[in-house]
Image (cartoon, rainbow, N blue to C red):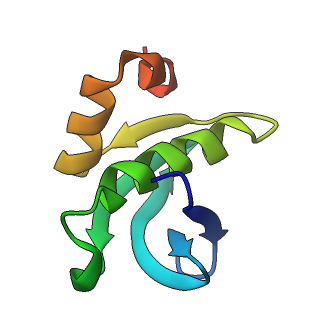
Amino acid sequence: MSDIDVTDNAERQRFEARRDGELVGWIDYTTAGERLVLTHAETVHAFRGQGVGGATTQAVLDLIRTRDETPQVLPACGFVAHWIHEHPDYQDLLPH
C-alpha cells in the first residue's frame, strides 16, 4: 500500500497516515532524550485488514530516516516492534 502519505503532527505527538487525504491510521510517539519512542499504532476501523498498519509503520520509519539527525527508535508498541523485527533493513534505527 504505497499510496499512504505520512506527516508528523508534532502538536499531537503522532505520525498521521492519510490515503487520498483521509486519515487511515497513526503512530503515537514521545521522546526520551534523542530517542523517539513509538508508543501506539492504530488503524482506522474501516481500513483494518488492508495492510495499512504495515504501510504506516514503514512510511513512518522512512520519514524518520529523512531527518538530518536520525534519532534512535524505541518501539514500545508491540505491532511496531514486531514489524521492525520482521524487516531487518530497519533494525539500524534501533538502539545498539
Q: Residue at x 45, y 53 (%)?
A: 1
Residue 22's place in the image compared with 17, above or below, is below
**Residue drawn at point x = 60 percent, y = 40 percent:** 62
The mark total stands at 0
Determine if residue 56 is in view: yes
Q: Residue 3's x, y, as percent? A: 56, 60
Instruction: Give the vertical position of 28 relative to 70 (above or below).
Output: below
Give the residue at x 48% y 83%.
Answer: 23
Q: Is residue 65 left or right of residue 76?
A: right
Dividing the picture into quarters, in which one does residue 47 lie? Answer: bottom left
Q: In this view of the protein, which residue sits in the foreground, 46 or 6?
A: 46
Residue 55, placed above or below residue 4: above
Judge whether residue 14 can be spotted in this image.
no
Choose top left, top right, bottom left or bottom right for residue 88: top left
Q: Position of residue 91 (x, y in %)?
A: 41, 20
Task: Name the quarter where the C terminus is drawn.
Answer: top left
Q: Is residue 45 left or right of residue 21?
A: left
> Residue 75, how many percent across, how many down?
32, 42
**Residue nearer the viewer, 33 or 62:** 62
Q: Is residue 47 above or below residue 56?
A: below
